[in-house]
């Protein structure tokens, strides 16, 4: 592979990932509204396009054409940059995620990963963690007390759960012995029985809980809890800037779903008769659905309950899990 | 009359001996139901619902007189049963049209039905067809009528028209068995009710002076105003208490106001209500309410011109249909800018009162209309009562009817209405100009010789002479006769003849010559021959005297002398004197304004003619609010300062705005109320502090009374009768027909009419004209062309030229005398 | 029927009190509570319930402008003025009770004495912009002349559109086709009305 080829293929991949995932984020909102509606015996969007399919488009047009309002007393450059940080970090995190198994198209072998970094997991988690600046800066810059409260909540929540995320995947990583997501994937190539979830169920649960917290999903969406702080850090945002927060959130959800699938659920290995590509899409879809499912079923927790859960329950559990894993590996 | 104490339901009540229990209860806030009784009128005993138990006996509270120490119970089991049965009977065949009925909830039938808890009907009788009748301004629906006879009673006892009566209803008689099964009084009441309905004395049409008091007193919706009928529910109307602006009585009334229609939110007056238990309105007050002057807004151009006119003017001429406050504004303008204030009519009155005070010793008359109501001997001189001041006429009639009173009515114009007041009333239609003789006659008959100036006594003596008269007397003679009759022996059964001597008294007529006192005054006045005899009868047991003096006296060539005589009557007789001011606020104007005799060169007229005219009737150079659009006070015939409120808004300029532009300073016209001259008897009350109501016992609490000032009387007495002033030949009298007073009554839509020449039916015949013909009325001071109309309420040969239409100019033509010689030519 | 009975709307107050445990204080109790709550599987019950509903796909949405729920005949939307069934005259007698009782003060009527010696309602308006559809007018109407209808879509560009009288009066042809249905809501004659009144004796 020449450098040119590499550059071109990378740019193409970036564009494809950007395009597809932006669209998926949009489509994700449609799915979310539909699924929530069905679970609540409603129909959801129905009027724009067949079954309301074009609702996403309509929303997009609305967001793009809406007036860009910047509050008078806000710190303008930061206020304007913050949503971009949110979206950008979400997409950058995807760079190190192998999305599908290798495949050939027009005679070219495609590695569906933008950059196979050998510390992929660290990279993804790191970039996702730096995404916390988006709500933090947004909330602090918008000169709004709800925004400020939302920002403060963001910081405590993300920082706390970052710890749990890291510790929870420590154990699988110890088993695999590599930080490359492809290596982790390949570790589970032996089929259904090889999935890490079977050996590390506690880690999986912890990772999932922490993932929910990091993507601000119910039951942990404290930073924009409507009933308490209007819309948290996004209170003053409207139009496309607000939309970028949204895209970031949904992209993060997908990223997280990919991570969970790759680390715990056998990645893109073939699953029985199901080819690997389809398998990972199914897994990711299920996890995405699970995000929505919990939103329909579970209530919010209080901020103090959240912190209590993190530091007094999840963190000890994660540590105990690592210790046990270590002991087992040593023996 | 002595103060006594009776006990009603355990409550000690002070009362006058002989006062009806019902009135005592009402005055003390104790409720006794009553439908047919009207305060100030005689008990009808039609409803029988005011049944109470007095000292253990059932009596009707409306006609049972209270005695000292009486114990009254207003409710017993038996009474409750009677009352309930009575209300059930009233509800028999009463249509359930409450939804459309004009009484709309102000219905006494409804109230008492609910009060007595009637939830079930036990009685029934076949109904007879009852057709609604249109009686001109009144509309009678016998279907709704409960025959309480209040209308009949008020028409007879208060108004004096006696135009209504009960007429047979027809239909089935009551089932005789009911007499046993029904409560006694309820049966009696039903028996009477079932036989009668209300009808007019004259058949199908109603011929009366259209006062509409029957509408006011009707407890149900049977009698309503034709114009008001079905136009509004009572509860939608906003009642604004006011004083009637048409004559000097200044009656208390309410203007009922509501938006005009859905399309037009401007308020308009729908009807006039009155406190009919305490004050009776005449037709002009009741039906002449919408004389407001509607303007779109402030006409700044006209206002500017008005201010210019005022700056140029040296005279303000104005009429007396203004409030006291406006009069004071004019007076202040006079003080500030030296205007002459000209108001001929009020000036005449002022001069009359000035002369009056010189002999009376006080600036005001002693009586009021209430004292006329309460008196039992009433005299009226120089007033066409029914059109000059209908309240005075009601009082006159009421006194004669209720107090077994008697009266003398001196007036050149024959008045069938007054003649109908009763038998104890002597109407003397003297020649115009001889009012002095009437006044002297009163002094002669009632004056205390010691109190009167010597020359007056001597002058009166000069009329008397001794004469003889042949009198036919009836004496009773004792006659003894022998009578033979057949008597049957009861034991034996035999018949035999018995002769008896019977003594009995037999009347016998005897003629004899009697020496009598002849009074030449009676000859001058053309009094009937039996005047003296009738006077003896009429004066028997009379205690309270009152005399009503009218406009004829001050619009008279010898008004000064008449005034002095009036003053003597007040000072030297027992009479309560009431002088009827000629216009709404003539008394107020004459007290507040320093009036001038002669007008200057440039005249601003306020509701009067002038070079620049401010007019409340809408035809002047600058519009002014009419009296139903203004707040302020009037000084009325009762010498009372009565407040009136604005029923309708006014968008244009007020006199106060003009006054402010001319250098006076007051934000509102009513700021002048407290500034009315105390030297003339006014008091310093703010307008908003003036009360305006009647108490339950009928006490009038409206505004305040002005106090009379005492004047040192001169002892000059009065001049002799000028017999040459008597007018012969054709005479015209300046007088309005019933219901008309001024341009405002003329303007109101229910009374709208043209000024005509009014004459009696016999005069019409003798003139040889038809009704509706136009004639030329030629008078010494000018002529006028008018159509002819028969006035049913006058008799004799004198014709009437009205002054309610200023265009006729009657005020000017008749300035020197209310009577003028006239030639009537057919056009 | 006494007033007390009339006022009783037959609503039994059936409240249940749910006992609430005191929150644990000791750390061990707290831990026990977490364990209890975690392993009771309530979270999964919640997940199951919403999943079940999704699968059942028992949708309750009414797609409003396209679909409309059938409304109760007692629904109180824009008023109707009824006519007499046989003669076709307006039922309204102009008693003005609706005008009086209207708490939004939005009803006005003009009446007059007509040629047939009856009270005629010459104009009648309801300012629907002000009306709160409380139903008092229908309840108070003695003639069942004004009732509430089912027309609840009354958005308009002009206030004037809120006062049209002809819109609410039953059209004559509509009446002739027998489409004027009696209103069963407030103010209608109760089914047992006959039992509740006392008959007045008649002499013929």
Image (spheres, rainbow, N blue to C red):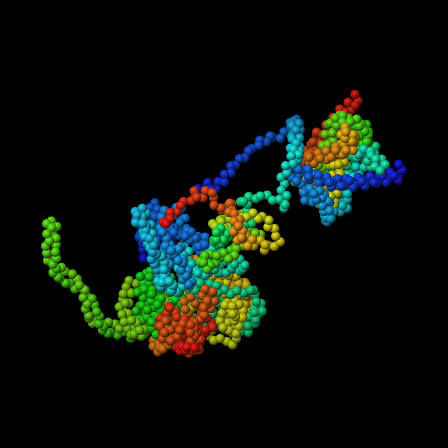
Q: Position of residue A246 (x, y in %)?
A: 73, 41
Q: How many marks?
A: 0
Answer with the quarter of the image where residue B303 lies: bottom right
> Is residue B186 depicted above or below B561 in this figure?
above
Mark yes or no: residue A174 visible.
no
Residue B801 picture quarter: bottom left
**Percent position of residue A177, x then y:** 81, 27
**Quarter of the figure with the N terminus of chain B:** bottom left
In the image: residue B515, left or right of residue C12: left
At 38% from the left and 55% from the top, the residue drawn is B129
Residue at the top extreme of this rendering: A331
B293 and B750: which is toward the camera: B750
Up the image or down, A110 lies above or below B707; here it is above
- Picture quadrant of residue A318: top right
Residue name at image x 34 percent, y 77 percent: B723
What residue is at 50 percent from the left and 57 percent from the top?
A: C122
Expressed as whole percent of the image width and height from the top left, the position of residue B719 reads: 35, 75
* Screen quadrant of the C terminus of chain B: bottom left
Residue B148 left/right relative to B612: left
- A232 or B260, nearer to the observer: B260
Percent coordinates x, y for residue A137 in the rendering: 75, 42
Extreme residue in the front direction: C177
Q: Is residue A130 visible?
A: yes
Closer-to-camera residue (C111/A329)? C111
* Residue found 77% across the figure and 46% down from its top: A77
């Amino acid at each position: 592979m020449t450098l040119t080829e590499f550059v071109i293929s990378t740019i193409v991949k970036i564009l494809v990932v950007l395009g597809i995932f932006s669209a998926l984020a949009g489509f994700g909102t449609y799915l979310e509204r539909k699924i929530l509606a069905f679970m609540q015996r409603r129909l959801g969007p129905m009027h724009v396009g067949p079954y309301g399919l074009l609702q996403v488009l309509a929303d997009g047009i609305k967001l793009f054409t809406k007036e860009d309002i910047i509050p008078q007393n806000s710190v303008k450059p930061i206020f304007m940059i913050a949503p971009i940080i949110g979206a950008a970090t979400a997409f950058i995190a995807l760079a190190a995620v192998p999305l599908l198994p290798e495949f050939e198209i027009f005679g070219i072998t495609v590695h569906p990963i933008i950059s196979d970094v050998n510390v992929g997991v660290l990279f993804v988690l790191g970039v996702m963690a730096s995404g916390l600046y988006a709500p933090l800066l947004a909330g602090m810059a918008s000169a709004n007390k709800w925004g400020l409260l939302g920002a403060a909540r963001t910081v405590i929540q993300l920082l706390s759960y970052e710890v749990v995320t890291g510790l929870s995947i420590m154990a699988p990583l110890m088993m695999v012995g590599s930080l490359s997501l492809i290596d982790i994937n390949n570790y589970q190539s032996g089929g259904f029985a090889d999935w890490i979830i079977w050996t590390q169920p506690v880690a999986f649960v912890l990772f999932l809980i922490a993932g929910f917290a990091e993507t601000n999903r119910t039951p942990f969406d404290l930073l924009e809890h409507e009933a308490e702080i209007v819309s948290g850090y996004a209170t003053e945002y409207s139009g496309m800037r607000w939309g970028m927060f949204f895209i970031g959130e949904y992209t993060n959800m997908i990223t997280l779903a990919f991570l969970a699938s790759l680390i715990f659920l056998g990645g893109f290995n073939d699953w029985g008769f199901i080819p690997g590509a389809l398998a990972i899409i199914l897994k990711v879809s299920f996890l995405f659905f699970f995000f929505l499912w919990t939103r329909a079923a579970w209530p919010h927790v209080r901020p103090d309950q959240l912190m209590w859960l993190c530091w007094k329950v999840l963190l000890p559990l994660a540590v105990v899990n690592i210790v046990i894993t270590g002991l087992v590996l040593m023996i | 009359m002595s103060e006594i104490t009776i006990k009603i339901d355990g409550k000690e009540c002070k009362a006058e001996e002989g006062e009806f229990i019902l009135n005592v209860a009402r005055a003390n806030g104790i409720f006794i139901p009553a439908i047919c009784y009207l305060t100030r009128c005689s008990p009808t005993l039609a409803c029988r619902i005011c049944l109470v138990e007095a000292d253990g006996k059932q009596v009707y509270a409306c006609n049972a007189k209270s005695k000292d120490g009486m114990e009254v119970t207003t409710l017993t089991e038996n009474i409750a049963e009677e009352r309930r049965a009575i209300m059930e009977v009233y509800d028999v065949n009463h249509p359930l049209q409450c939804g459309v009925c004009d009484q709309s909830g102000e219905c006494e039938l409804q109230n008492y039905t609910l009060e007595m808890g009637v939830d079930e009907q036990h009685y029934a009788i076949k109904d007879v067809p009852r057709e609604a009748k249109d009686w001109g301004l009144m509309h009678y629906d016998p279907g709704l009528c409960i025959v309480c006879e209040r209308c009949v009673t008020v028409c007879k006892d208060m108004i004096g028209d006696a135009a209504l009566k009960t007429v047979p209803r027809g239909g089935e008689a009551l089932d005789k068995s009911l007499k046993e099964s029904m409560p006694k009084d309820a049966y009696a009441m039903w028996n009477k009710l079932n036989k009668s309905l209300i009808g007019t004395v004259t058949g199908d049409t109603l011929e009366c002076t259209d006062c509409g008091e029957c509408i006011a007193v009707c407890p149900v919706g049977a009698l309503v105003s034709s114009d008001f009928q079905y136009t509004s529910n009572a509860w939608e109307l906003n009642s604004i208490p006011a004083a009637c602006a048409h004559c000097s009585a200044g009656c208390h009334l309410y203007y009922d106001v509501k938006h005009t229609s859905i399309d037009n939110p401007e308020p308009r007056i729908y009807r006039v209500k009155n406190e009919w238990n305490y004050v009776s309105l005449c037709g002009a007050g009741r039906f002449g309410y919408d004389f407001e002057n509607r303007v779109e807004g402030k006409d700044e151009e006209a206002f500017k011109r008005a201010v210019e006119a005022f700056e140029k003017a040296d005279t303000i001429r104005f009429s007396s249909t203004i409030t006291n406050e406006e009069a004071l504004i004019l007076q202040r303008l006079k003080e500030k800018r030296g205007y002459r204030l000209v108001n001929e009519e009020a000036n005449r009155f002022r001069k009359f009162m000035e002369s009056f005070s010189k002999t009376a010793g006080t600036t005001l008359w002693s009586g009021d209309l209430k004292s006329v109501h309460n008196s039992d001997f009433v005299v009226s001189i120089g007033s066409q009562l029914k059109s000059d001041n209908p309240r005075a006429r009601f009082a006159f009639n009421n006194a004669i009817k209720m107090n077994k009173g008697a009266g003398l009515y001196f007036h050149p114009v024959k008045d069938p209405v007054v003649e109908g007041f009763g038998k104890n009333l002597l109407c003397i239609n003297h020649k115009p100009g001889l009012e002095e003789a009437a006044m002297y006659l009163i002094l002669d008959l009632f004056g205390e010789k010691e109190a009167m100036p010597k020359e007056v006594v001597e002058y009166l003596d000069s009329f008397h002479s001794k004469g003889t008269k042949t009198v036919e007397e009836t004496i009773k003679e004792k006659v003894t006769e022998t009578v033979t009759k057949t008597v049957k022996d009861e034991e034996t059964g035999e018949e035999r003849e018995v002769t008896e001597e019977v003594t009995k008294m037999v009347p016998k007529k005897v003629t004899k010559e009697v020496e009598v006192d002849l009074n030449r005054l009676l000859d001058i006045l053309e009094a009937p021959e039996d005047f003296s005899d009738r006077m003896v009868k009429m004066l028997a047991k009379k205690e309270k005297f009152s005399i009503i003096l009218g406009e004829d006296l001050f619009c008279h060539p010898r008004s000064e002398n008449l005034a002095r005589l009036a003053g003597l009557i007040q000072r030297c007789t027992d009479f309560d004197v009431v002088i009827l001011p000629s216009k709404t606020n003539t008394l107020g104007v004459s007290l507040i304004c320093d009036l001038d005799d002669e007008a200057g060169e440039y005249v601003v007229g306020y509701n009067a003619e002038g070079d620049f005219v401010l007019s409340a009737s809408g035809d002047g150079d600058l519009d002014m609010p009419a009296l139903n659009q203004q707040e302020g006070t009037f000084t009325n015939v009762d010498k009372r300062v009565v407040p009136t409120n604005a029923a309708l808004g006014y968008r244009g300029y007020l006199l106060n705005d003009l006054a402010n532009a001319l250098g006076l300073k007051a934000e509102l016209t009513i700021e002048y109320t407290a500034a009315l001259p105390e030297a003339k008897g006014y008091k310093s009350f703010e307008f908003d502090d003036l009360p305006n109501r009647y108490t339950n016992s009928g006490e009038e609490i409206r505004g305040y009374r002005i106090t009379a000032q005492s004047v040192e009387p001169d002892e000059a007495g009065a001049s002799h009768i000028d017999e040459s002033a008597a007018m012969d030949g054709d005479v015209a009298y300046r007088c309005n027909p019933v219901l008309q007073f001024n341009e405002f009554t003329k303007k109101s839509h229910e009374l709208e009419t043209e000024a005509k020449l009014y004459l009696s039916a016999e005069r019409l015949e003798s003139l040889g004209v038809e009704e509706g013909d136009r004639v030329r009325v030629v008078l010494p001071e000018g002529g006028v062309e008018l159509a002819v109309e028969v006035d049913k309420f006058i008799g004799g040969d004198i014709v009437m030229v009205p002054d309610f239409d200023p265009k006729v100019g009657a005020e000017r033509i008749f300035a020197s005398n209310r009577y003028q010689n006239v030639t009537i030519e057919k056009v | 029927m006494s007033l007390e009975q009339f006022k009783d709307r037959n609503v039994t107050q059936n409240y249940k009190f749910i006992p609430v445990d005191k929150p644990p204080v000791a750390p061990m109790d707290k831990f026990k509570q977490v364990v209890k709550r975690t392993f009771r599987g309530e979270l999964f019950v919640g997940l199951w319930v919403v999943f079940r509903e999704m699968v059942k796909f028992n949708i309750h949405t009414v797609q409003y402008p396209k679909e409309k729920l059938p409304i109760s005949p007692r629904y109180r939307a824009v008023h109707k003025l009824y006519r007499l069934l046989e003669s076709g005259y307006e039922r309204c007698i102009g008693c003005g009770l609706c005008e009086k009782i209207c708490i939004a003060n939005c009803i006005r009527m003009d009446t007059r004495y007509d040629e047939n010696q009856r009270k005629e309602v010459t104009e009648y308006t309801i300012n629907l912009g002000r009306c709160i559809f409380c139903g008092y007018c229908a309840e108070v109407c003695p003639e069942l002349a004004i009732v509430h209808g089912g027309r609840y879509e009354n958005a308009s560009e002009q206030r004037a559109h809120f006062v049209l009288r002809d819109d609410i009066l039953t059209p004559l042809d509509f009446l002739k086709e027998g489409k004027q249905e009696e209103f069963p809501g407030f103010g209608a004659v109760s089914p047992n009305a006959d039992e509740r009144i006392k008959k007045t004796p008649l002499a013929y």
